[in-house]
Every structure is written in C-alpha cells, then in structure tokens.
Image (tube, rainbow, N blue to C red):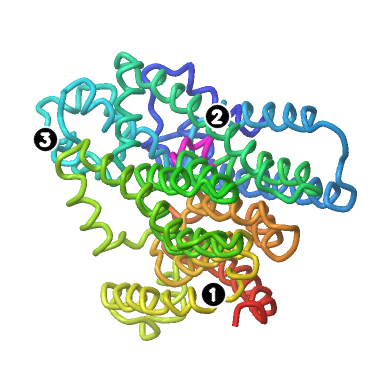
Amino acid sequence: MLVMAVSARLWLQSPLKLTEFEFDFFLGLFHSADRVQAAPWLLWGRLIHFGALLALGLLYLALVHRLWRAPPAGPARRLAWHVAGLALVFAAGMPWVSPDAFYYIGTGWLEAHYGLNPYQQTMKALSGFAADPMFANIYPTFLGGITPYGPLFQKLAAGVAWLSGGNEKLALALFKVVFLAAHAGACVLVYQLAPRAWRHVALVAYGANPIILFSVLTCAHNDHLTNVAVLGALCLLRRQSVLAAGAALGVAFSFKYFPVIYLPAFLLVAWAQASQRMAPGAWRDSARLLAGFLLVALAAQLLYPGSVDKFTRMAGSGFDIYRNSIHHLLQLLGPGAELARPELGRFLQHLFIGAYPLLLLAFWRRIRAVPFEAGVQLCLVTTLSYFLLVNASNQEWYLTWLIGLAIIQPPGAAWRLALRLSAFFLPLVIFTVKGPPEMVLLANAALYLLLLALGLYYLGQVRKDMPLAA
C-alpha cells in the first residue's frame, strides 16, 4: 500500500501531470529544472521501485510455494477476498511506467466527442488539440498515430470516454473499474480451468500475480480483456462448445490482434476432441470453430473503415524495437554481432513463420492423445517462442498473455516459468527507459536474458515430454 501511495496522490492533483514524469517513481514530486539537483531523487526512486517490487516478488514466490506444498481445502471464498483486496490496492496506484492508458482515453475521446475514426484520423490533426485536457497526458509521439488496437477495444474506449464526460481522471478510473472486473473474470476462469486439486493455489498464483496486478491495474494496460477472452475460449473448447470457443477467440483477436496465433492450435484440439469421442466428420468441429472466429472477427472489423488496413500493415511490419528484446542482447554483444535491425527483424519473423508448421507437427501426436492439455501447452510454447525470436518489445504487460496459459496447467515447468518471471521481471523495468544509454542497454539486455534463460529451461522440459509428440 505504501508503494502505491506515492503515485496515488496524483488522483488529487489538478491538472493531472503524469506522462512527462513517466519512469520516475515519484512522478515529479521532486522535479526540478536543475537536472543535477533532480538526479539523486530519480535514482532513489528507481532504487525504491527495484527494492519494493523485488521484495513483493519474493513474498509472492514464498506464498505460492507454501500453498503449493500444502494446498488449502474448503471454499475458495476467503482466498478470493484476499486477492480482491490486493487488486484494489494496486488499482489505486497511478501508472509511473508506460502510461498508455491515456492514449486509450485520447482515442476514445477522438471518437466519442469529435466523431472521428481513430483508424483514419489522429488527435494531432485536430485544431486546438493541445488545449483539450483529455489529450494532456498522451505521450507526444502517439498524438500523431492511429490506434493499433482491435475494433472491440476501440468501441470500449469510446464508451469509457463518453461516460467520463471529458474528465480525464474519471476516464482513467472507469478503465480501472473495467480492468478490475476483467481480473475478477480471469481469476474465475483460471480457477475453473486449473486441475481440481490445485485450483486454490492457481487462484492465488494468478490473482495475486505481481506482473498482472501492476501491469493491468496500476498501469491500466488493456491486456486483461484479451486474457479473459482467451481463457473463456479455452473453457468453451474444453467443454467442446466449438462454435462459441471460436467466437470467444474472435473477441480476443478484436481486442488485441495477437491471439490469432492460437487459432491453429484451437483447430487441432477441436478435431482431436471430436475424433476421441468417435464423432463422424471430426473436421466439422474445426470448421465450426473457424466459423465462430471469422464471424466475430470480421464483424468487428466492419465497425471501422480502415481497421483492416491497419491490421494488415501491422502484421507485415511489426513494431519498433523498444524494450527487452533479442536486439538489445545482440547490441550488447557488440556492433558487429547483429545484422541491420530491419533485416534481422524480417529474418526472425520469416524464421518463426517457417518453423510454425514444424511446431504444430511436433505436437501432433500429443494433441491426439491429450487434446486440451496439449493444446494449452502448444499455445504457451508458441507465445514464448514469439517473445524470444520475433517480438521487438517484450514489455511486462505482454507477459500477462502467458501467465494464464501456464497457471492452468498442472504444477511443474510451466508454473516455474510463470512464477519466476512474475517475481523477478518487474524490478528492473524502471531502468529500461529514460536513463544513461549504458544503463538502459544493460537493463533491457538483462531482462531479455532472464526471459531467455527461463524460456529455454521451460522449452527443454517440454522437450522431455515429447515421446507423446514425436
């Protein structure tokens, strides 16, 4: 609570000034025009962030391991209340790193108030945009860009902005309410999907997860909307409600585009489940799932002219190098250790696309034997492989995508991956932006190395299970 209190004071500040002080733990409390005078406070803030979040991560590990050794019995209600209380504390904090939530507010206001299409018009193109308080805390570069998010999220952003009536802090609070509800829904789904003997532990491991609480509730990133939809799709897939499962995956895609990468795994699982119950024409289940996905995904794209064009351009070009990627590691090794970045990015993207059918083939026999369990594992391996090879920006909120996929599996290698990332990733994030170039490079490379080491260990453990898959 004390860690959140420093930033929570900004709820009382008017006008709100936040984004200009991002990656400052104190969010401008000790700001000075004299950089020499301000520098010690910035460093102290980063050290506090590092120490506090490391301590939080270690406490989280200790709690989950204690429950792991002796899973609690009885109703989960008491654990749920503890998780809810912790979520509220994190939601009270303001985003002192990567406050993208203000961009959501801005694009929502662009549509709701000005009646413009965020896939075709920008905030910067408005005359007098600088005087509108709903745009005041948007990172300046983002003012000139069109939204990279899916149409369903854009409709939600417009609804939140409209409800706020032009009050920026109310809009941020409304987003946090939405994400608190999403977190509650995700926790329920994780509880339902986890192995019965480990449900209570899974509830705490997911619900009290530092990366999720900080990224989704403190920093108000929108990833939990996608997470809930993917978990819901998995729940429906396990029940063999394939049309609905495809539709839920289409919803996930229409919030953020990444879940399209899970579609082949879902199609294989639907076919394998139908084959196991000796259903005639097992391929029809895969066709129904695909139909559900396409129906929702295409309908959502029709909401905005220009959204399809934005998606295809993103799929073709990817994202700029920003944080914690393989590019930072190669740069650390020396200027001669990396290709020109655009060429390297395209090469890695093509390598991943070319290797993806081989990954599906490797899981083929395992999916036929244990369809749902192998399908979840395939989704996790696919996500992790994408992070390690292709993704040029492995921000902490992206890691929430894999945590649910890990926690709903039986305790083992997947849990170790999720728990260790959750404990040790966040402390260094504060050093990855807005610092001396050497420090920034070291922090980004260190976080990629952490992801690489834990990821390779997990993939090695998966490989040991591959007699069923090869």
**Mark 3 or 1, nearer chain start:** 3
Q: CA distance from mark 2 to mark 3?
A: 33 Å
Dot 3 falls on a residue whose secondary structure is loop
Q: Amino acid at mark 1?
A: Trp
Residue found at x 54% / y 59% = 279
Q: Quadrant of residue 453?
A: bottom right
Q: Nearer the viewer, mark 2 or mark 3?
A: 2
Q: Is residue 421 in view? A: yes
User: Magenta residues, as a range?
Assistant: 215-222
Dot 2 lies on which element? helix
Q: Residue at x 38, y 64 (%)?
A: 392
Disc 2 or 3, which lies upstream in sequence?
3
**Badge 2 amino acid:** Leu
**Looking at the image, do the residues carrying marks 2 and 3 touch, with CB atoms under 8 Å apart?**
no
Asked whether 255 or 366 is in front, the reply is 366
219 sits to left or right of 321: right
